Image: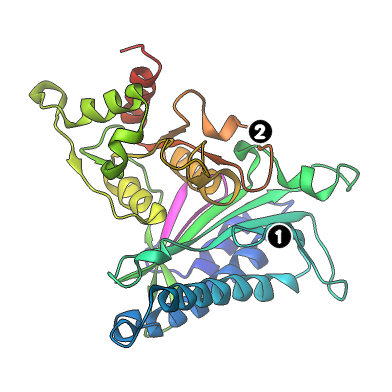
Amino acid sequence: MAQGITVTEFILSGQKEQPEATGAFTSILSELTVAAKIIAQKVKKANLSDMLDTMESESVGEAFIQKLREHANSTIINRLSHIGHLDCMASKMNTDLIPIPKKYAKGNYILIFDPLGGITNIDVPCTIGTVFSILKKQGPGEFGLMTETLQPGHKQVAAGYFIYGSSKIMVYTTGNGVHGFTLQPSIGEFLLSHENIRIPKKGKTYSVNEGNYYFWKENVQDAIEYFKTPDLKTGRPYTARYTGSFVTDIHRNLLKGGIYMYPENSKDPSKPHGKLMLTCEVNPLAYIVEQAGGYASNGFERILDLEPKYLHQRLPVFMGSINDVRMAENIIQGKH
């Protein structure tokens, strides 16, 4: 495929190769790109660093961040509600499913998303992003919407993310390779820039918040020590690269290789099973990473095989280059 074609042209070319295609994917992905452009503009104008000079309390900054989150959330909901291809939506920001208004037609797909991940670092500034997952209903409706939404990650029919940084980038997969597009501001279009992304089987970096080191289990500490310990034969030590923005760290590792880790943290009893959410954060990125040749695990099982128990279920995450994640698994399970 020629570099520089628009994401819409790329999606349409894929649709033509599928005789049974209805155009639903094209419509959903096209509306998501429009929503991302709107969010990108809002993020660009949100100069939190200027506001910090006049802030009198931390709560003001939190309120400002919450406004940005709500803007991103409502933008996606409003752009996708009317297209007639979704049966419902689910967001990291909403405790329950988001119904499609009765005035609009419904479809056979379910959209799950994190509207603005990593936003607490916007004043640094750090790259932040939107993550999305698309599922297809498994039946004519007799199973109930929540059951339809809680499908294991391997049943996703599409997943992707937008990152808002020095460049605005879209990466997505429909189960046939991973492709990246960069927003060209002069024409307002996402253009093909990274076709058929493949993550290296082994990387040179590890991404983890080592400030939590003493709150991890010993087997997890052992895995971290492995990547830090010098060994010229295996290309260690790895270099530490961690931004605090999940989608940003995964994007870097997707292109350059490496392992991302967010283990359970015993100091946070409110999140005893980890911080990251399975359905709206982890599954879509795990699907992308595996479509690019990588691997995603909770330390003991393949993440995409897990059956979600509830909408905002959290879990530990080890994701990235397949050899690195397998090594972390082996150490955590006491096999190395």
Left or right: where 60 falls relative to 331: right
Q: Amino acid at mark 1?
A: Met
- The x and y percentages for residue 11 are 56, 61
- The x and y percentages for residue 197 are 38, 48
Residue pictured at 29% horizontal, 55% vertical: 243
Left or right: where 312 falls relative to 63: right
Q: Earlier in the sequence, mark 2 or mark 1?
A: 1
**Dot 2, how many residues are within 10 Å of its Cα: few (below 14), some (14-19), or many (20+)?**
some
- The x and y percentages for residue 265 are 41, 37
Residue pictured at 36% horizontal, 52% vertical: 251
Q: Relative to the observer, which residue lies in front, 314 or 284?
A: 314
Q: Residue furthest top?
A: 335
**Colour convention:** rainbow
- The x and y percentages for residue 65 are 46, 73
Depicted 7 relative to depicted 233: above or below: below
Q: Amino acid at mark 2?
A: Glu
* Distance from Cα at disc 2 to Cα at disc 1: 19 Å
- The circle drawn on residue 161 is none
Q: Which residue is mark 1?
A: 89
Q: Which residue is mark 2?
A: 307
Q: Relative to the observer, which residue lies in front, 238 or 290?
A: 238
Q: Is residue 173 magenta?
A: yes
Q: Secondary structure at mark 1?
A: strand
Q: Secondary structure at mark 2?
A: loop
Q: Residue furthest front?
A: 56
Is any atom of residue 1 visible in this view?
A: no
Quarter of the image where one finds residue 138: top right
- The magenta-colored residue range is 170-180
